[in-house]
Image (tube, rainbow, N blue to C red):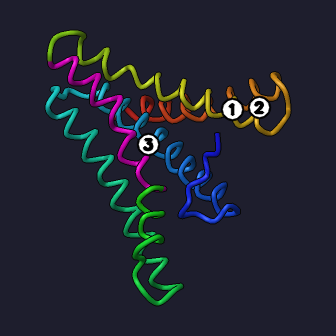
Amino acid sequence: MDDRRTDVPPGAQAGVLADRLKERIYATITMIAVVVGLSLGDVGSLGAVATVLTTALGLWLAAFVADQQAHRTVHRHLATGRELRRMLYVSSPLLSCAVGPAVLIALAALDVLSLHAALLAAGVGVVSLFLWGCLGGLRMGGGALTALVAGFADAAIGVAVALVKAAAGH
């Protein structure tokens, strides 16, 4: 199956996908820190979901404003058309990073699980970092051992963020 979009030149497709994945990984690491911080505090479901959603929105707005500012400075005009669609496509994972935590918090609000358990599910973010690292290791052609090392290295970053957040007590 050809996964190239028709509005992106073939040589640019890999760059667009790499930029999008970069945003997804950045958003995952940030959301791990936010969720761990929430799990250490005394927050209700409404406050937790509001924090998760506003964090994702804030990340996305910051990235979008920075992209537009950089584009305007370099190209002397606002991004429109194809350029704007690329910005929105690349930055959308910054919004989607809130979906998993928000669903778990909603389940806690419905008493399906405790809010503390829902917030500790930040481990899902660490698992996703591990999987992205493994995929990157495999795509580099290093074999299973290289993929596992890359996966554990990426997951270690997520764990380190969680530990620093927990050690700081917020």
92 part of magenta stretch: yes
**What residue sits right under mark 2 in the picture?**
138
Residue appearing at x 43%, y 87% in the figure: 77
- Dot 3: few (<14), some (14–19), or many (≥20) neighbours within 10 Å? many
Locate residue 95 relative to residue 138 in the image: left or right.
left
Q: Which of marks 1 and 3 is nearer the N terminus?
A: 3
Locate residue 35 relative to residue 19 in the image: left or right.
left
- Which amino acid, mark 1? Leu
Residue 96, image quadrant: top left
Q: Quadrant of the C terminus?
A: top left
**Residue 106's x, y, as percent?**
20, 23
How far apart are the two marked residues, 1 and 2, measured between alpha carbons? 5 Å
Residue appearing at x 35%, y 46% in the figure: 95
Helix, strand or loop for disc 1: helix
Looking at the image, is 140 positioned above or below residue 91?
above
- Dot 2: few (<14), some (14–19), or many (≥20) neighbours within 10 Å? some
**What residue sits right under mark 3 in the picture?**
30
Helix, strand or loop for disc 2: helix
**Residue 72's x, y, as percent?**
44, 83
- Dot 1: few (<14), some (14–19), or many (≥20) neighbours within 10 Å? some
As drawn, the label of residue 135 is: 1
How far apart are the two marked residues, 2 and 3, measured between alpha carbons? 25 Å
Q: Which stretch did the figure color magenta?
A: 90-109
Residue appearing at x 31%, y 25% in the figure: 39
Q: Report the predominant secondary structure element of the magenta stretch.
A: helix
